[in-house]
Amino acid sequence: MSESSLVEDSTSTKLTSTLENYLKKLDETTIHHEYMIALFIVLLSESGFYVLPMSEASFSKNEKLIYTSPKQWKTMKDIYEIKLVLKYLPHVICKLVAISSGDRLIVNFFSTTGEKNVYSIAIQSLKYVNPFSNNFASRYMNLKEISHRFKDALVMRVRADILTEAGLINPSFQGLPTELKLKILGMLEASTLMQVSQCSRHFNVLCKEPLLWQALLRRDFAEKQVKSDRGWISCYRMRYIEHNRKRHHNTSCSSYSSCSNCKPEIGRYHPSWIHPRVDIPSNIGNYHIPLLSDFLRLHGSSRQSHLDFGNLFRYRFGSRFGR
């Protein structure tokens, strides 16, 4: 079995060869924060990032990791700044900026092109580094934890941003092929689909795809009608409103004819989970109706249910509140 080249597979007795070779070149004046930065450089190399300056020969030989002392990246007191690039996109420069604050290291990673989303994490260096150990294998602790955390929170997000900006397929949702994104969006509810459409311009266009709403009509309402002049989204909206009206009609107060609290000018509909004859507690004083919204959210989560209950409450108990 070949030796693993990933840092997360290191053990308490054996480090991966890439990390061990890097540590051998560090001098005795290296502090714990700089050990962490050396670890970050190795983790970045595992994800295809190269440290600048790099020569063209380094790209051709696939040399992801070239030794550079962390002290050379120290631009000013307690600040380290490292420039990196992806192998297949050498024109896109990324920056890793690490700021030491006591025993913590605040790490920021971002691309200098595109939207420039900055991703940050704060790391307690002494949780992962033992600078007093003479054994390389025991110099680091919890390598699997910090490897996953660093890659998930910083490296893979910046990598996804770069590849998405370049129009290349990547493991992020935005980087999936359009066919797969439409397949995933087609599994969502209409309300969720409208929320996704507000994420970006790209998803706004995808969520208005007529085929999605045509499929939603068939799934939610067994609708088989041909496309109208209004479009599939408008058809779904009208069908949804009609469905709600029928549902409200079916849940009307069954005792409408004998219930003294149900008057035609107010409306017949009462929510199925409450009857208008419920008595108001005697210890409730003159509260303003809108301020009771949080108190009244006893059942259901839909906004319409709260509005319906608000109307019912205003009609049933309005006289007691001086209204």
Image (tube, rainbow, N blue to C red):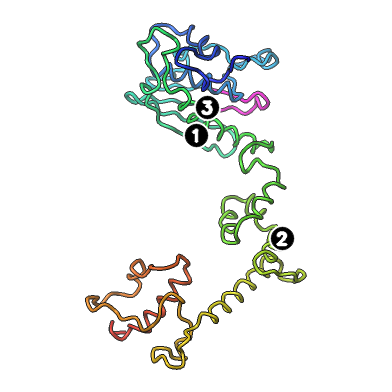
> Quadrant location of the C terminus?
bottom left
State whether residue 322 is above or below residue 63.
below
- Tag 2: amino acid: Pro
Residue 153's mark? 1
In the rendered image, which residue does mark 2 sit on?
A: 210
- Secondary structure beneath disc 1? helix
Q: Residue 272 versus residue 295: which sits nearer the camera?
A: 272
Q: Residues within 10 Å of mark 3 (few under 14, many from 20)?
A: some
Q: CA distance from mark 2 to mark 3?
A: 41 Å
- Tag 1: amino acid: Ala
Residue 179's mark? none
- Secondary structure beneath disc 2? helix
Q: Relative to 72, is 3 on the left or the right?
A: right
Q: Residue 289 versus residue 152: which sits nearer the camera?
A: 152
Q: Earlier in the sequence, mark 2 or mark 3?
A: 3
Q: Residues within 10 Å of mark 1 (few under 14, many from 20)?
A: some
In the rendered image, which residue does mark 3 sit on?
A: 95
Look at the image and give the residue range highlighted in magenta: 83-95
State whether residue 112 is above or below residue 261.
above
